[in-house]
Image: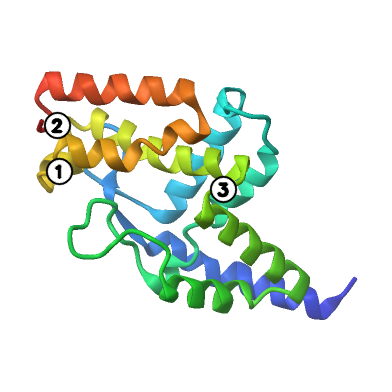
Amino acid sequence: MNTADLLKQVEFIKEIDKIKYIQRKTKLFNSDRCENDAEHSWHLAMMAVVLAEHANQPIDVFKVVKMVLIHDIVEIDAGDIFIYDTEINHTNTEQELKAAHRIFGILPEKQAKEFISIWEEFEEGHSEEAKFARAMDRFEPLLQNASNEGGTWQEFDVPHDKVYDKVKVINHGSTSVWNYAENLINESVEKGILRR
């Protein structure tokens, strides 16, 4: 047993507890309580396991689970940016990269490199695993908002076109999940919970 590595890993485990305090704008299903990043990441991991058979291409499900569990850890330093924010672009920033190096850098070097690599792969969105992981990341808040009679769409007056533009990436990871999502968007417009 490498005691030095174990100490670094325990330090990392303590550090990432902070993710439980990062509040997201999206609320839990049928609830008025905002979810936190830890709840979001856990939910995405379960979604990836349950919906893996719907991926457009064969995927390494364990790698997808790693991606969705670590993708928002950088928000401990960088904070959560609301997907429909009109002032701050919801894309990878220099601040997030700096956060990735600081937080994952707590780990032993080999693990740190692996986690940074997986985080970067998710952000780039090119591999089949990243496409599917990103699909899950966009699908979950869509389901939440639909369950909450428009949720943050209503709260922040987000129009159909903006929602559609942000979630169409689902199609790159799963056409069948995208077909479901697109129908849900259309139903939400028909119900009047998403503004056309």
Give the residue type at disc 3.
His
- Residue 31 visible, this angle: no
The residue carrying mark 2 is 194
Image mark for residue 126:
3
| Mark closer to the chain start, 1 or 3 | 3
Kindly report the distance in space between the C-alpha atoms of the residues bearing marks 2 and 3.
Answer: 30 Å
Residue found 14% across the figure and 39% down from its top: 159
Give the residue type at disc 1.
Val
Q: Residues within 10 Å of mark 2 (few under 14, many from 20)?
A: many
Q: Residues within 10 Å of mark 1 (few under 14, many from 20)?
A: some
Q: Is residue 157 left or right of residue 187?
A: left
Q: Please, what secondary structure does the residue beneath circle 2 have?
A: loop
Give the residue type at disc 2.
Leu
Q: Is residue 105 left or right of residue 96?
A: right
* Quadrant of the rendering where the C terminus is positioned: top left
Badges 1 and 2: C-beta atoms under 8 Å apart? yes
Residue found 12% across the figure and 45% down from its top: 155
Residue 85 to residue 61: above or below: below
The image shows residue 49 at horizontal and vertical percentages of 60, 32
The residue carrying mark 1 is 158
The image shows residue 188 at horizontal and vertical percentages of 19, 24
Q: Is residue 154 left or right of residue 6?
A: left
Kindly report the distance in space between the C-alpha atoms of the residues bearing marks 1 and 3.
Answer: 28 Å
| Mark closer to the chain start, 2 or 3 | 3
User: Residue placed farthest to the right in the image?
Assistant: 1
- Residue 133 visible, this angle: yes
The image shows residue 60 at horizontal and vertical percentages of 70, 38
